[in-house]
Image (cartoon, rainbow, N blue to C red):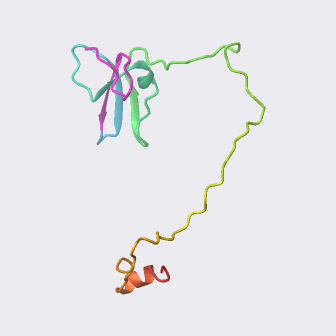
Amino acid sequence: MGGVCARQFCSAPSIARVDFDGEARVVWIDDLGDHKPAAACCLCRRHADTLTPPRNWDLHDLRSQPEAAVVTISPELAPEPSLEPTQVSVEAAPAWSPRLFASVDTGTVLDATSPLLSRAFHGVR
């Protein structure tokens, strides 16, 4: 029953099937199998290990080896932290103005005749 992970932009091979029951608020992760019924989706190991259910839902991991993937970086390969402040140049943006272009005729657009519109557009001209 192979395939690829159902997560977007992931092309890793799927190793686990995920199913859920919305009424019971339960999510199951199980091993892929040839004789198991269809699942809601199939995920790769990384996405299955990091799957978190919605708030107030239960997660039941029924896989034969539900170990989470642990990535360790040896100290000699880790990048050195930099204590130097970085210089960031920020250009001042021009101040925003709500004024309309002179070429736009606002005579009919801002003609507020109802009480609600006259309150909303009071003093716009």
Above or below: residue 123 compared with residue 83: below
Q: Residue at x 73, y 36 (%)?
A: 86
Q: Residue at x 39, y 14 (%)?
A: 64
Res. 108 image quadrant: bottom left
Res. 114 image quadrant: bottom left
Above or below: residue 22 compared with residue 81: below
Percent of width and height locating residue 84: 78, 32
Q: Residue at x 31, y 33 (%)?
A: 20
Give the residues drawn in magenta, as a range: 1-21
Numbered-mark total: 0
In the image, 81 versus 16, the foreground residue is 81
Percent of width and height locating residue 90: 67, 47
In the image, 81 versus 73, the foreground residue is 81
- Which image quarter holds the N terminus? top left
Q: Main secondary structure of the magenta part?
A: loop
Furthest toward the front, the residue is 103
Is 8 magenta? The answer is: yes
Is 14 magenta? The answer is: yes
Res. 52 image quadrant: top left
Q: Residue at x 42, y 43 (%)?
A: 56
